[in-house]
Amino acid sequence: MPIITLTTDFGLRDSHVGAMKGVIWSIAPQVQIADITHLVSPQNIAEGAQILRRAAPFYPPGTVHVAVVDPGVGTERRPIAGRLGEHFVVGPDNGLFTALLEYHESRGDRVEFVHLTNPRYWLPRLTSVFHGRDLFAPVAAHLANGVPLSQLGEPIADILRLAFSKPIPIPNGLRGEVTHIDHFGNIYTNLMRSDLEGKRVREVHLGGTVVKDFVKTFGERLPGSLICLLGSSDHFLVCEVNGNAAQRLGVKVGDSVDVFLEAMS
């Protein structure tokens, strides 16, 4: 049974998500629809890209991922669909697929995109403000029904990519950046497990605070303790056990974080 996932900034109180699901089931009633999230911060394309990257790879082959964080809806920005390995994506060409695309490229997976130019696979009336319902949802349903990607539009090789920051070297360590704050107030950074290989974390400077506890999991320390660890997606995190580290430290996305390292003995 085909699966279509939805990732949006539409929230939960309005009709937008329900309308998209209705369109999908009208065209492909056999599909399962999975909600990755509808609580991406409004118009925050980078946040949506990171959330999609962390969730999408865990779905089975053939899954169609629809992502709509689309402040440029109705403008010159292109609607696109693509194949990333054994998965498909549908959404706006605004950088939303950057992180997932880079993941598949790093694995050597097959990658191809089309500009959605064939109105046969859209709703009959395309509004200028709701491409999620009128264009992306029907295209995803047709993909799930087996319509080839090539029938949906013209091939393109120049999709827009976000320029995600990378950690930079500093004396005895790395300077990174806060990229996401989750529901629990855990602070995600752009440092990854691979950045720490062969090194031991000595201390972390963030929000005017020094954190020295690097652990494997939350339960190793008492509630209220500030800790560092590697999360389930291999990102380097700063957390408060049973608390909200972002609130406690007054940290926001884009703030710098200095991680001081020493060689493993």
Image: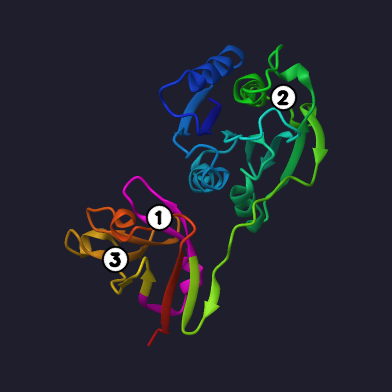
> x, y percentage for residue 158?
78, 47
Q: Residue at x 51, y 80 (%)?
A: 170
User: From the viewer's perspective, is 258 left or right of 87?
Assistant: left
Residue type indicated by callout 2: Val
How crowded is the residue under tag 1: few (<14 C-alpha within 10 Å), some, or many (20+)? few
Q: Are marks 1 and 2 in contact (CB under 8 Å)?
A: no
Instruction: Report the mark closest to the observer, 3 or 2.
Output: 3
Of helix, strand and loop, which one carries label 2? loop
Judging by the rendered image, the residue that carries numbered circle 1 is 232
Judging by the rendered image, the residue that carries numbered circle 2 is 147
How many angstroms separate mark 3 from mark 2 (CA)?
Answer: 49 Å
Work out whether residue 145 or residue 75 is closer to the camera in this orientation and state it: 75
Of helix, strand and loop, which one carries label 3? strand
Is residue 199 part of the magenta span, yes or no?
yes
> x, y percentage for residue 123?
68, 15
How crowded is the residue under tag 3: few (<14 C-alpha within 10 Å), some, or many (20+)? many
User: From the viewer's perspective, is 192 left or right of 134?
Assistant: left
